[in-house]
């Protein structure tokens, strides 16, 4: 065996162990959210902490650094990608003291428990201390990593390597202008009433378990469970766990969330598992992950074609007859509300803009945790025109900060932007996509994503992959066009742009 | 801080990490049995393997050896216990090569999947290869540990330190004589018919969730789920998971199993969590663990007093009226069958004797995996008088070997022996126990176990703890007495002995 092949084999063994240990951490997190009894919180914090510490120890091992350096010399694209991907993760780990890794794992378990209680009892004070601790740890982490010009940059870089606040703002500014204009138009039009579909949890679950495999989610390699804050945990392409929640007054609330997580899950199930150990068996970026989930949830899940097919499934499973025109209008109506995960496609991105501003200000220290509730109300009024009456409808609504996920939120809107351009490309590539969706054949959508995104894994970073799959497109323009074409048209306020299917 | 205190603090930190990592392994195992989709099997094997390897690495760390040596000098009983308990675990780890640890974890995941399939399809051939591999690994482990005179000794020592095949046989021989004599008498008496209680799974689950907290199992620090082979996973006193299964034709099958696991679970919940890091917060031995579960299942769960109270619970929860005399007789009838976990109290121990003989012979190589089905049939005929018609009713019935748990089976009968003496002591100590049980007050039983067993943790080993709690008793005599008093009396064949309550 050549010296370089030995380094590659050694690297692959390490990467596999790191990957497996990350999956172990994933299971600890999943279980904490889905099944763990309340009494297990303290021990779970320690368990997550020791796994994080051991994973960190493997990452900073100098032998791994040597193997990386050797593999980095290779001309093979897969090996280059492995050296690049793992090199970044290792660089961040080397810069992060082991004590911070353990502390963050421990603090996030405490913060999660506090957040859950604070949100349930609508008592922001219960979360203030743990949140201040998480902000402090995020600032500490940012200082240790020390890339970029803004303290937020080092955190963004953890989700999308190289991403900066400046780049985010360059995309978000024109998007904000377009969204505000569209929203103004819609506010001037005749309002559309919500038409929620009441359904028992048991019936909803049966419907969800019909929809997921129809889209392409393989239940033999995954599960669907219930959690207070839905998420997807991909531990391996063979074991991908979705969670959802049920609102008996509103089928679509849980269903769109399930489709969203299913979008993440199909990406995880479609990753090139045979390239395990190369890091190429991972998603291209957090934003590309969100592009998948948002594409399924919004482009597919809110389309009249999908909803028409769904009406048949619902009738078969529950005997309930849906009023299709009312359902389509309801799924695409626009109304500024308090809750991000329940927001329509237009205002959703304004929720993200709000969080991005607040996170950046928390990171610099411009904004303190004490000032946070006030700042949230103010931004909510400015961007969405509504003031949350309770903290559970305001800054307590999202799980992210309790988990230390500062810098994650922009990925959702980046995902919407990527999804818009990807979907334009998909419609060109598979021109019969809407006829297929209308009859419950989702293979054009899944096939496109499998071919161009999933199977490519992390050979390229997200933005580069987007540029390769949808070259020359303008994601901000594509997203605004699609919103104008669907939501704008629904309200009769189409201002410009090309037609967009669905 | 004194040097010795520094060593103690360092030891406690290591013990806590080892304990937490064991809990992580426990969650991986629990999830594999309860929720994991089939597609996750290969990755789960790797995950368990990496956790086992890292735990082994922490155990063999020379710094831990130094701390242990320093703490071993202490005169404090808690520190002495810690040095003794961890010292043994570390000695075994030092003697076990890391490669064997990883291999065993990996092989056991494969063997578990193969066993599950083999049992479901009644195809012994599917499990033969994986089983041969597990036997080979057990023999390898035994050779590495190298204690005792028989290859089985090194494995027994892993569950009950110092236990040998010779000691097991010294207890099992007189027990066998007594059991065979009792069984012969019962076979000559008029048979008692089984009176199974049919109940839907949903109703059974409601009953189980009434019974468990009544006994003293805290559902805020634990759970009850479904698994093909019931077990208890104590990850922390605050997080103890029970699993059970449901037979809609027979309430008591699942209920007695649930009480058994609940007995384990209450032990785990009652351990002195405040002594975390000292190893004293662990159970005294595997046999003492089984003593708890068998005491609850058999002494309590099959008693007329418990069953009388249960009839009220069942009526409240389901409206079903139980025929109490028939139920009591049915729960205490004796009939040699194929399945250990469904066996009555008398023949149960013969199932264990069978397994002990077969395991010992597999370990020496006297018996090959190919010869195993034949040997099982032969021993089953000799000890129980029945020949299993299918492998799923024979050597494929138990999960243990697929998990590499060779040497565990004797603990069940040791547990029955301990439980018999413990219960005699309990009846002296809490003379109103049966009046209390009859009205659903189980506090005399739990109180006794909490005081004398649970809260003591692993300050003493199992056999020493038994001798302290029930000094001067003969467990074989106590078990035979209690079987004669309950089952013997039921069949009118009481031969000797004192009366035993319940």
Image (spheres, coloured by chain):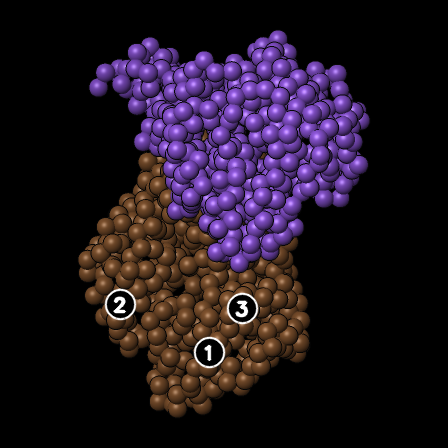
Chain colours: A purple, B brown
Query: Which mark is on residue B204?
Result: 3
Indicate the position of residue A313 as horizontal and vertical percent values. Answer: 48, 51
> Answer yes or no: do the residues labelled 3 and 1 have beta carbons within 8 Å?
no
* Relative to B156, A291 lies left or right: right
Indicate the position of residue A99 as horizontal and vertical percent values. Answer: 59, 24
Q: What residue lies at 47% left-to-right and 86% top-to-bottom?
A: B490
Which residue is situated farthest in the top direction here? A149
Spatial separation of the CA atoms under disc 2 and disc 1 = 23 Å
Q: Nearer the viewer, residue A97 or B360?
A: A97
Q: Which residue is mark 1?
A: B196
> Answer yes or no: do the residues labelled 2 and 1 have beta carbons within 8 Å?
no
Q: Which subunit holds the residue at mark 2? A: B
Tell me: residue B99, above or below residue B192.
Answer: above
Q: Which subunit holds the residue at mark 1? A: B
Q: Which residue is mark 2?
A: B390
Tags 2 and 3 on a common chain: yes
Examine the rendering and report whether any part of residue B31 can be seen: no
Tags 3 and 1 on a common chain: yes
Spatial separation of the CA atoms under disc 2 and disc 3 = 29 Å
In the rendered image, the quadrant that contains the N terminus of chain A is: top left
Spatial separation of the CA atoms under disc 3 and disc 1 = 13 Å
């Amino acid at each position: 065996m050549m010296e370089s092949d030995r380094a590659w084999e050694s690297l692959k063994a390490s990467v596999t162990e790191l990957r497996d240990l990350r999956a172990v951490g994933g299971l600890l997190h999943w279980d904490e959210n889905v099944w763990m009894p309340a009494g297990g919180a303290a021990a779970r914090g320690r368990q997550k902490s020791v796994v994080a510490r051991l994973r960190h120890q493997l990452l900073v091992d100098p032998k791994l650094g040597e193997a990386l350096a050797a593999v980095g010399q290779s001309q093979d694209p897969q090996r280059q990608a492995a050296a690049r991907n793992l090199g970044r993760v290792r660089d961040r780990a080397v810069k992060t003291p082991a004590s911070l890794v353990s502390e963050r794992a421990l603090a996030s378990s405490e913060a999660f428990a506090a957040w859950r209680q604070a949100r349930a009892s609508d008592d922001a004070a219960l979360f203030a201390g743990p949140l201040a601790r998480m902000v402090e740890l995020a600032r500490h982490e940012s200082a240790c990593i020390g890339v970029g010009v803004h303290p937020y940059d080092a955190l963004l870089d953890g989700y999308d390597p190289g991403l900066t606040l400046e780049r985010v703002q360059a995309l978000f500014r024109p998007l904000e202008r377009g969204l505000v204009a569209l929203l103004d138009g819609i506010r001037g039009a005749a309002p559309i009433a919500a038409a929620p579909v009441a359904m028992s949890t048991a019936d909803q679950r049966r419907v969800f378990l019909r929809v997921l495999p129809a889209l392409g989610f393989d239940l033999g390699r995954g599960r669907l469970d219930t959690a207070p804050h839905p998420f997807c945990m991909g531990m391996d392409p063979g074991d991908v766990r979705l969670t959802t929640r049920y609102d008996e007054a509103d089928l679509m609330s849980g269903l769109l969330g399930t489709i969203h997580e299913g979008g993440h899950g199909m990406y995880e199930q479609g990753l090139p598992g045979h390239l395990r150990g190369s890091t190429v068996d991972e998603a291209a970026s957090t934003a590309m992950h969100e592009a998948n989930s948002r594409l399924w949830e919004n482009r597919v899940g809110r389309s009249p074609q999908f909803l028409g097919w769904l009406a048949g499934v619902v009738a078969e499973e529950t005997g309930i007859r849906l009023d299709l025109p009312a359902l389509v209008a309801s799924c695409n109506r626009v109304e500024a509300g308090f809750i991000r995960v329940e927001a329509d496609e237009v205002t959703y991105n304004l929720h993200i803009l709000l969080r991005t501003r607040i996170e950046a200000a928390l990171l610099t220290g411009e904004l303190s945790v004490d000032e946070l509730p006030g700042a949230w109300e103010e931004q909510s009024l400015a961007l969405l025109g509504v003031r949350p009456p309770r903290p559970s409808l305001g800054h307590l609504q999202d799980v992210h900060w309790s988990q230390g996920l500062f810098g994650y939120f922009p990925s959702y809107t980046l995902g919407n932007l990527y999804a818009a351009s990807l979907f334009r490309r998909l419609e060109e590539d598979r021109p019969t996509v809407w006829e297929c969706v209308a009859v419950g054949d989702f293979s054009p959508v899944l096939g496109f994503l499998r071919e161009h995104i999933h199977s490519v894994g992390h050979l390229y970073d997200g933005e580069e992959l987007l540029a390769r799959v949808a070259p020359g497109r303008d994601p901000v323009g594509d997203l605004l066009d699609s919103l104008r074409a669907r939501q704008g048209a629904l309200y009769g306020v189409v201002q410009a742009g090309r037609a967009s299917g669905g």
